[in-house]
Image (cartoon, rainbow, N blue to C red):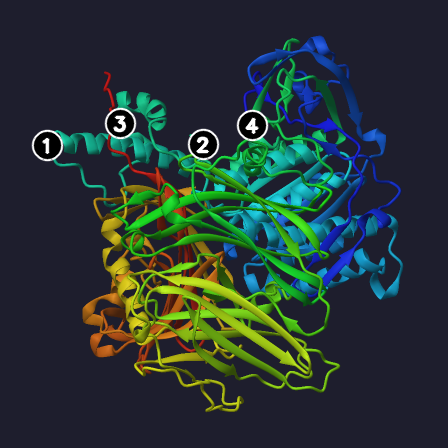
Amino acid sequence: MSESKVHLPIFAKIGVSIAAVALFLVFRPLAMQGQNNAPATEVAPIVTNVDEVAMDLVAHGKGKKPILDLRPEDLRVEDNGTPVKISGINLVSGKSGSERLVTFVFDRLDSAGSTNARNLAAKILKAIPQEGFSFAALSIAGRLRLQQNFTYDREELRKAITLASAASNSERTNTSEAPERMLIDIAKNGTGNSGTTATREERFHAQVMLASLEDSQRIVQEQHTSPSLGGLLALVRNQRRFPGRKVVIYFAQDLRLDSGSGVVTGSIIEAASRSGVSIYSLDASAVSNEVNQDLMSAMSLGNSVAMSSSRGSAPAPLTGPPARSFADTTTPGMQSQISNQYQRFEMQEGNDIRGPLAKLADDTGGAYIRAGQNPKKALRKLIDEMTTYYEVTYVPPSRDYDGLFHPVRITPLRTGLTIQSRSGYYALPPDSGSGPKAFEVPLLKMLADTPLPADLKFRSGILHFGNFGTGNANTLVVEVPVSELETQDDPNTNLYSCHVSIVAQIRNEAGEIVEHFSEDVPRHGALDTKGATREVVTVQRHFLEQPGEYTLETAVLDRNSGKRAAQRSTFVIPQNESASGLSDIALVRRMEPFPEEVDPDEPLRYGNSRVVPALIGRLPKGTKEISVFCLIHASTQSSEETRMEMEVTRNGEPIAQVPLQLRKMQDAGSVPYVATIQSASLPAGEYQVIETMTQGEKVTQRSVAFGIEGPQLASANVPEKLSTKDQDSDLPQDSHLEAMPLPSHALVITPLPPNSAPVPSPDELQAIIAAARKHALGYSKSLPNFVCIEVTNRSVDPGSSGAWKHRDSFSELLRYVDNQETRTMLERNGQKTSSQRSDLDPGWTISTGEFGPLLKLVFGESSKADFRWQEAATLGSDIVQVLSYRVARENATINLSDNNGTIGAGFHGLVYVDKATGGIRRITLQGDDLPHNFSIHAASMTLDYDFIRIGTHDYLMPLRATLAVQRGKRQIDLNEMTFRNYRRYASQAKIVYTP
């Protein structure tokens, strides 16, 4: 940050009461009234708006001495390029007695990163004054997790930091359970340790922290983002309720960004500005700043090589280490051009090679600290900001809530004056809660248009499920066909991507908004199936409301094309007159993995799956199965038997009628039910499925309609009879079927047992394997030319006891050019080196092949791998099909070597196949049948892939890998690799040589 040209954070003061907050954790649902329990010490929070802008800034004079007499004439402020007049300036000092909160957040770390993070945290605690600071410690493992809520007890904090920074994801998850349960007790009942009564301040802190934990899980699901970004957004957004300045110290080794992450990072910066939070990001990797400079130099040199190749001369080989430091291998003229050439590269985060960690720090007024760097300067800045700072206010030149980022620039006019602050604000309307997200603003404006825009087609609707769980349950469903969206197609990778934002609001009869939902959805798919399937982007959200008339408003924005559409419709939530009855019937588009702990109140949950409903009423001819879902509400007070019957009609004429098999319902309450119709033989026409439930004298009937496309056939071609095939051995068989005239086919209905996950048919399994094999064998050739940094941390456990000792770490510049990967070692143990991999100790295993060869080991034809389907699962927000495989030793192409020679080894493992794209998201490998006299007794590897934006496209790239080898009797060697700072290795930039 330049000391003469800096940017500022933005706030405006508006008193806001705390609304009732609905709270939910995976442990149990919880509702409480935050307003009634808020402590008396709470003050009006700080909110961003464009009526009056307030900036907080730190002013220093010569020698970094704080300036305590800053005046309006000492500053020049520009809002979006327009000079503004300062209307007020106020010094806030540590003597005011305001609470200063510091939050430590630890993301996923490997063993070396965990050590680095703890050492940095210890230095920070030592530097911060003993009085006046309260600390909390959290980790990120699937969502934000609490290890220690705000406390002045530094010894307790140190223990929590040790747990939060653990390298094991499961360890951080397990150790957070007790603190989170205590948090719930304090927030709900005001009861602390051993039944003691918590203070009002402790209870208020607990309520805010609990809201942060819950929001982190919701944000990950709604905005389809990583737990890292979702956790940071939830944390800084909820800390808005605390008065004064706050600091979040975020420890990470990398921060993954894909095509949809930019919106979330913008939301974090906006929320931090509203909340008065500065983010200090600490890179716990062993990569130094010099390595990043080498990366920049390497890319510039890559241009020279590519340019020489384009002139017909062969490029210089890029294998092996250079004779001197990489920056010195260029000519003097080339060195003078490096900074200019760097601007020409397609960068993931603008031109800041330090990446998103630095961007979050710079744009929130914090600081970026790398591993090995002395944090003294950054800590001095942290302490100054939290103890002595100014609030400067002005009226902005634009009063429009456009939702856009407005850069604010301040220029010191006083000699020797330097200013530190943030970069600007998002112009969002004032609110009483967390406010509209940045991506929502254009959609909310759309709902005020007359007429409503209709650039693209989509469907929206409400399904009613009656009394379920805690109230009258309903589900909003919005479907946007992918065919209506502009896609970014990449034939080289066989991937397409699209990006759609959706906002839905429900108003009551008085016009008040009673429910508000939104999702920002990036989507990837296989290009060769885009036209053959009717893919839709589906958003479904359940809510509880009282019976009555409502209005549904829905807005959709295609982020790629800018096309907009909105709809407004009315619906009625019916009054439940009886405890028994049927819910609405929903057509089933698909079923996806959905463990109960994710949301026990989900009305569309069926066993360990969730039903994704289909609003579309048209199905292609030859659709093999049509499934319907409903909730059966049986009265627990009635002794009458519950009976169900299904009728199917075509073009208004009944074609089949059959009783449905049910378990005993007397003690069941609300029971989900799925019935599947084998429909491949159904001719074209308009169909209706009618379900009738009878319990005593109570009869309830619900129906759902759909059409099968194609030419209308004669009625003689309809199925003659309807049969049932019950897969549940607990259910009695019923042979009573209604006969239909003109026998030709049997229409089969199959009740789906709740605990049975959808299993792919043999043909479907072969299609999954074929798609994965196509991706695996073509993976290397589908990748662009790129460079990245590969960091390897090596550890050893001599006795297989879990007592890992860090051995060393090294970082390499990995170049992937024309389907060939080469590595140049840059650092070892934090020091620049000219060593190569071959110079490392020969008795230690080093892995390669993450960019294709490993996949070919499994999917190559010569391996003759035996694949079996294991389960459907989720990785992040994506659905994967998990396959097990085994490769026999006689077919294996993997070799293991020791001092006695080399052997071929069979192996087995798991492959996680992305359902939407067919790409590999995770692969594991474990050696089989190793000889007893061989020094290596076990070897295993795990490699994770995820979508990374390189240039203008997303690619499935390696993120992290682990390699474990057991040697001798007990020793285990462990390599942990991370791949970061992916950049396109461009070939079009021109370099001008000068003498």
Q: CA distance from mark 2 to mark 1?
A: 33 Å
Asked whether, in this view, residue 542 is left or right of residue 317, the answer is: right
Query: Sequence-wise, which precedes: disc 2 or disc 1?
Result: 1
Residue type at tag 3: Ala
Q: CA distance from mark 3 to mark 2?
A: 18 Å
Q: Quadrant of residue 53?
A: top right
For disc 4, the marked residue is: 405
673 in relation to 549, above or below: below
Query: Residue at 48% across / 53% down in the picture?
Result: 538
User: Residue 61's spot in the image, x, y percent?
Assistant: 68, 16
Q: CA distance from mark 3 to mark 4?
A: 31 Å
Q: Is residue 150 visible?
A: no
Residue type at tag 4: Phe
Which type of secondary structure does the marked residue at label 4 adopt?
strand
Viewer-proximal residue among 827 and 978? 978
What crowding class fits label 2: few (fewer than 14 Cα within 10 Å), some (14-19), or many (20 or more)?
Answer: few
Asked whether, in this view, residue 875 is left or right of residue 886, the answer is: right
Query: Sequence-wise, which precedes: disc 2 or disc 4?
Result: 2
For disc 2, the marked residue is: 352
Asked whether, in this view, residue 311 is left or right of residue 658, the answer is: left
Asked whether, in this view, residue 424 is left or right of residue 748, the answer is: right
For disc 1, the marked residue is: 312
Query: Sequence-wise, which precedes: disc 3 or disc 2?
Result: 2
Query: Sequence-wise, which precedes: disc 1 or disc 4?
Result: 1
What crowding class fits label 1: few (fewer than 14 Cα within 10 Å), some (14-19), or many (20 or more)?
Answer: few
